[in-house]
Amino acid sequence: MRRDLIMTLFEFQLLSETEKLELIYREGIYIGKCKTAGVTTVLYQIDSFYIELFYSQYRRYVKRTRCFTSTAFLDPYLRDIDIGMLVNGTAST
């Protein structure tokens, strides 16, 4: 069930690691993933902020998280999003 109130980044950071992961998996909006140097990074959005989960083995162990509100950190993920349907009505091939 979706929360009725908007969570701030500060409120999110006050949660335990277990509570953070439960909230991300339950309500986070998946944006994309990147893989560099054997680390898979998965990006989610919750309300007005973003969370990166850094996995040492994809979807097995979260090494660390990074939370932010700036869109400057989104570039590595946005490169892989096909916006063809939005721009001209067809997906790119």
Image: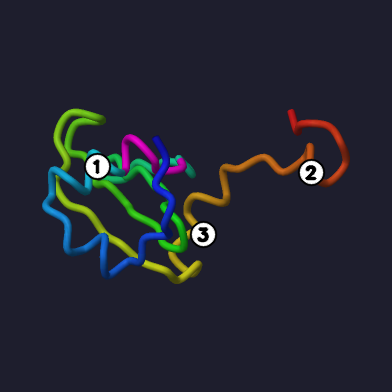
Q: Which residues are magenta?
A: 24-29
Q: Nearer the viewer, mark 3 or mark 2?
A: 2
Say which residue appears at 13% left-offset and 49% top-offset: 17
Pointer 3 residue: 75
The residue carrying pointer 2 sits among few (fewer than 14), some (14 to 19) or many (20 or more) residues within 10 Å by Cα, namely: few
Name the magenta segment's main secondary structure. Answer: helix
Q: Which mark is residue 19?
A: none
Q: Secondary structure at mark 3?
A: helix
Tally of numbered tags: 3
Q: Is residue 13 magenta?
A: no
Q: Which image quadrant: the N terminus?
A: top left
Mark sitting earlier along the chain (1/2): 1
Pointer 1 residue: 39
Q: Secondary structure at mark 1?
A: strand
Mark sitting earlier along the chain (3/1): 1
Say which residue appears at 83% left-offset and 32% top-offset: 90
